[in-house]
Amino acid sequence: MNAMLTTAPRILVVDDERSMREFLGIMLTREGYDVVVAENGAQALASLRQRPFDLLVSDIRMPDCSGIDVLREAKVVQADLPGILMTGFASTQTAIEALRTGALDYISKPFDIDEMKRVVAQALERKSARDVSPEPEIGGAPSPAGPRARDTMLGHSPAMLRVFGLIEAIAGTASTVLITGESGTGKERAARAIHRLSPRVDRPFVALNCGALTETLLESELFGHEKGAFTGAMQTKRGLIEQAEKGTIFLDELGEMSPLMQVKLLRVLQERRFRRVGGSEEHAADIRIIAATNRDLARMVAEGTFREDLYYRVNVIPVALPALRQRREDIAVIARHVVQRYAHEMRRTACDLAADALDALTRYPWPGNIRELENALERAVALELSPLVTLASLPDHIVTGAATMAAVAAAVEDAGAGPSSSSPRIPAEGFDLERHVQEIEREYLAEALRRADGVKMRAAELLGMSFRSFRYYAKKYNL
C-alpha cells in the first residue's frame, strides 16, 4: 500500500465561506481524517506543493478561481489526486465540466452530512484500491477503446451525441440521476447504459415501475417485508433495494409515486437506510438510484403533488432524452436495426426497408417514440413476405400520418415560393420551421373540422387521414 495511506488519509478542503470550511474540517477530523483547510485556490495549491493529499474537497464558486480550476491545477501538481466538488448552484453543464475535469463526485449544497461522509469514504477506498494495484478498476470510467453509451443506444444526431457524452461523463460517479423524456424514448436503456459504464457494473441492476403497483405493493416490493407483516406474508422477503446492494436501482415513472412513498424514498436518499415492512431493524442501502419520469416534476412541485425536497434529491444530475421526432436523422438506423432483429427472431426474409417505407417512417411524428416504432416494425416484419418491408406492411395510421406531414411540408414550400422562384423563401433573420409547420398543420385540421361541421370522422376523410391519426393531432392542438 502507498506509504501515505498507512496513516490517516489526508484531505484538503477548499471553500471561501469560513463557516463551511470550518464545519467540514471538524466533521472530517472526527471521522479520523487528517484535514487541511484553505480559503481559496492559491492557498490550496500552496498546500499541495508542500505535501501530497489523498482527496480534494472543494467548493465550485469562489472569488479567485473556481473549484474546477483548482482541481485542474491540482492534478498538474498531483496527477492521481481525486476530487469531490460542491456547489449551491447545480446545473447539468457544471456537473459535466466537473466530472470531465476528473472529479469523482459532485454534491449539491445543502448536502446531507451522512451522504458527504459516505462519498468521502468511497472516494478514499477507490484511491486506496488504485494505489494497491496499477490495474484499472472493474467497470471503471471507460477508456477511448472501452465501452461507450453508444454501444447500447443507437443514434448519431447532435441531440443523442450530447446525451452519450453526458452519460459517459457521469457514469463513474455515485450521484443520483433523473432521466426525463416522453414515454417510449428509452429511459431504461439510458439507465442501463449508465450502470454498464459505472464501477457498479458487476453488481445487480434492478428496475421497478412505480406506476404499475399500488402503494402497499410498491412498498413491499421496494423495501421487502417481514414474515407476518400482513395477511399473506408467509415468509420474510428481501426487497429490491436489498437485491440491488452495491448496484443500481432504476425507479421508472417516479411521478406516479404516492406522497407516503415519496417520504419513505426521501429517507433512503438522505440516510441510505431503510426498514422492511413490518420490521424494526434498520438496513444499510449501498445503492445508486436512477429515477425516470415522463411528467413535469417541477410543475408537480409547484402544484403540491410532488415533494420539493425529494425533487432536489433525485434531480442531482438531470438527463433529458429527446423525442424521436426531434432526431429524425436517427430513425433510419434505428428502423433498420429493429427490422433485422425481428427478422432474425421470427425467421422472416425481410431484412431492410423499401425507400417509400423508410420515407414514411421518417416523416411520421411518432407520439409513442421508439416503443411505437418497434411495435410498428414488429407487425410489418410479421406480415411482410418479401425481402424488404414495404409501405403496404406498415400500419395505416403511420402511412396516412406521414402523408399528412408531407402535404404540410409541400404547403409550406408553396407558401414560401415567390412568383419567379421555385424555392421557398426564408426571412433574412431566419425563423422556427417546426413551429411554422405546426401552425399550418393546425390550420388544416381546424379548417377540415369546420367543413365537416365538427364531425371528426368526416374531417379525417377530407385530409386523407385515419380517424386515429386525426384524433391524435386534434388532441395535440386542442381542437
Image (cartoon, grey):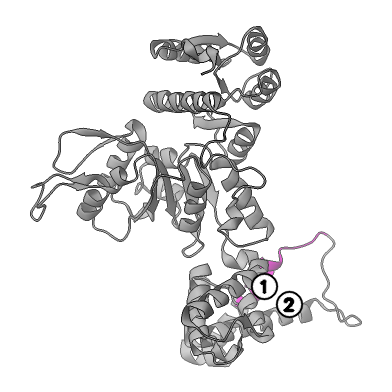
- Residue 440 included in the magenta stretch of the image: yes
Q: Nearer the viewer, residue 456 or 380?
A: 380
Against 113, residue 334 (above or below) is: below
Amino acid found under the numbered disc labelled 1: Val
- Residue 399 included in the magenta stretch of the image: no
Q: Nearer the viewer, residue 36 or 364?
A: 36
Against 336, residue 127 (above or below) is: above
The CA span between labels 1 and 2 is: 7 Å
Q: Is residue 257 left or right of residue 129?
A: left
Question: SS for tag 1?
Answer: helix
Amino acid found under the numbered disc labelled 2: Val
Against 18, residue 122 (above or below) is: below
Q: Which mark is residue 112?
A: none
The stretch in magenta equals: 429-441
Q: Quadrant location of residue 4?
A: top right
Label count reads 2
Q: Main secondary structure of the magenta part?
A: helix
Q: Report the residue at 32% width, 58% height from top.
A: 211
Q: Which mark is residue 412?
A: 2
Q: Report the residue at 83% width, 72% height from top.
A: 425
- Whichever of labels 1 and 2 marks the residue nearer the N terminus, that label is 2
In the picture of the structure, the residue carrying the numbered disc 1 is 437
Furthest toward the top, the residue is 50
Question: SS for tag 2?
Answer: helix
Would you call the spot at circle 2 few (<14 residues within 10 Å), some (14-19), or many (20 or more)? some
Where residue 217 appears, as percent x and y from the top left, is: 21, 55
Where residue 301 appears, as percent x and y from the top left, is: 40, 45
- Is residue 454 visible in the rendered image? The answer is no
Whether pointer 1 and pointer 2 mark residues with C-beta atoms closer than 8 Å, the reply is yes
Would you call the spot at circle 1 few (<14 residues within 10 Å), some (14-19), or many (20 or more)? some
